[in-house]
């Protein structure tokens, strides 16, 4: 639900509908893609440290598997709603299709605040979720991975639990595992890296390059931190960062290593202090006078209530669904470029794919080989989206719509040759 207009699911469906029309695909494609193929609800009892049983509700939404096994993360968040998981699963189907991966889309979630659980409780819950879903997932069925609130350790517990049930090691059932347990080391920073690559390529088109461009990053977790890191490496100047506890702004640039150390120690980047740095709220961060804005936290943060105050010319969606459809309309009219989630944050799932390929073969590439493959896939997608956008007409069509058309094209063709449509 959103008090600021369209919900995430409404935004996704609205864009999907328009893209299917723009691409000239049959209405039946919308009938199929506007609903998930399967929704699984699980209730997981956990013996808490106080001796009592607490039952947690979780979901796995298997949205569409026309192109291959369902693929997408698992979110641990206190306020998850089924509608939101459906929206996220739909975006995964489109994201995987857009990037040429042999996957459909899915998403899972548990309504829980992982920070409130002890390590043992978190492990029990993670194992319980893997057990409950074991009949419905697998390397060729559905391959979950981390999302907001989950991490490689949780994947390790889940892959261990699934492997015990299967009676053998099954590395390819979850991705983004720790490197020692068949994980690919690039996966840790791959989403942030992809955000930076998309920003760099768009900046070349807008300004001739990214060097010296100022950036504000909302979210200082796995995506936000690594996006800031790679953007800095590419020559941009990160002037503001924030997380759930608030943010900091320094027009001369933020020392990311120092800011990360403070975050790890105190729980929020808002406690980072240095000469010239001042505290800001998450809302203020979005409206700063910067060239590039990277929303890398949660959905619906850019809405019709603040869209007009945004000064960045380039928005790069590290998060899934940070911009509502009505905000996008306002920003598009102002000439702002929004690099949409299914494109800009796809680095994560692309390396999940590479890790899965490694797991199926029990053969592992070097970090450099993985990163080169990742960058090649991202560049290929970037060029296809830009070509499609220019063909459709940038004045009337958003980059998101162009990316959706590009994605729907593959899904439609797969459904057609399968005889679904
Ligand atoms: N949760 C990530 C996403 O939204 C990655 C999913 C994956 O690696 O499967 O794209």
Image: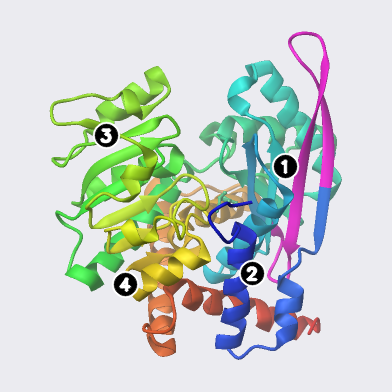
Q: Residues within 10 Å of mark 1 (few under 14, many from 20)?
A: many
Q: Which of the two labelled residues, at mark 3 and mark 2, occupies the earlier sequence position?
A: 2
Q: Is residue 369 magenta-colored?
A: no
Q: CA distance from mark 2 to mark 4?
A: 23 Å
Q: Which of the two labelled residues, at mark 2 and mark 4, occupies the earlier sequence position?
A: 2
Name the residue beneath numbered marker 3: 256
Q: State which mark lies toward you, 3 or 4.
A: 4
Q: State which mark lies toward you, 3 or 2.
A: 2
Horizontal and vertical percent for residue 295? 41, 50
Q: Residues within 10 Å of mark 3 (few under 14, many from 20)?
A: many
Q: Which of the two labelled residues, at mark 1 and mark 3, occupies the earlier sequence position?
A: 1
Q: Quadrant of the C terminus?
A: bottom right
Name the residue beneath numbered marker 4: 334
Magenta-highlighted residues: 41-70
Q: CA distance from mark 3 to mark 4?
A: 31 Å
Which secondary structure lies at badge 4? loop
Extreme-top residue of the structure: 50
Horizontal and vertical percent for residue 307? 39, 60
Which secondary structure lies at badge 1? loop
Residue 121 in which image quadrant: top right
Q: CA distance from mark 1 to mark 3?
A: 37 Å
User: What mark, if any, has residue 87 been given in the picture?
Assistant: none
């Amino acid at each position: 639900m959103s008090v600021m207009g369209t919900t995430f699911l409404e935004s996704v469906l609205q864009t999907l509908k328009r893209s299917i029309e723009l691409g000239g695909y049959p209405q039946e494609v919308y009938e199929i893609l506007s609903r998930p193929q399967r929704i699984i609800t699980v209730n997981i009892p956990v013996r808490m440290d106080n001796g009592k049983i607490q039952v947690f509700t979780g979901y796995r939404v298997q949205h569409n598997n026309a192109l291959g096994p369902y693929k997408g993360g698992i979110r641990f968040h206190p306020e998850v709603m089924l509608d939101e998981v459906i929206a996220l699963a739909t975006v995964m189907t489109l994201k995987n299709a857009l990037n040429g991966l042999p996957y459909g889309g899915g998403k899972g979630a548990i309504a829980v605040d992982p920070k409130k659980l002890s390590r043992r409780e978190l492990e029990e819950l993670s194992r319980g979720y893997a057990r409950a879903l074991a009949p419905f997932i697998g390397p060729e069925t559905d391959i979950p991975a981390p999302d907001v609130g989950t991490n490689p350790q949780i994947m390790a517990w889940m892959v261990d639990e699934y492997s015990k049930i299967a009676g053998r090691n099954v590395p390819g059932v979850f991705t983004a595992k720790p490197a020692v347990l068949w994980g690919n080391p690039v996966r840790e920073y791959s989403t942030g890296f992809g955000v930076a690559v998309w920003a760099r390529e768009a900046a070349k088109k807008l300004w001739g390059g990214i060097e010296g461009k100022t950036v504000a990053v909302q979210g200082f977790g796995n995506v936000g931190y690594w996006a800031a890191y790679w953007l800095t490496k590419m020559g941009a100047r990160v002037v503001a960062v924030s997380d759930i506890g608030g943010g900091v702004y320094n027009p001369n640039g933020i020392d990311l290593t120092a800011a990360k150390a403070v975050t790890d120690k105190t729980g929020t980047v808002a406690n980072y202090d240095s000469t010239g740095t001042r505290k800001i709220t998450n809302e203020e961060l979005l409206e700063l006078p910067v060239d590039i804005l990277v929303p890398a936290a949660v959905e619906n943060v850019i809405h019709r209530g603040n869209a007009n105050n945004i000064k960045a010319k380039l928005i790069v969606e590290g998060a899934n669904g940070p911009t509502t459809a009505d905000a996008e309309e306002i920003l598009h009219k102002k000439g702002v470029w929004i690099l949409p989630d299914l494109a800009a944050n796809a680095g994560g799932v692309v390396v999940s794919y590479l890790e899965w390929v490694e797991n199926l073969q029990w053969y592992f590439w070097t970090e450099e080989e993985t990163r080169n493959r990742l960058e090649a896939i991202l560049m290929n997608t970037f060029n296809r989206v830009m070509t499609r956008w220019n063909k459709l007409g940038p004045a009337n069509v958003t980059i998101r719509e162009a990316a959706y058309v590009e994605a729907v094209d593959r899904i439609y063709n797969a459904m057609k040759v399968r005889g679904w449509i």
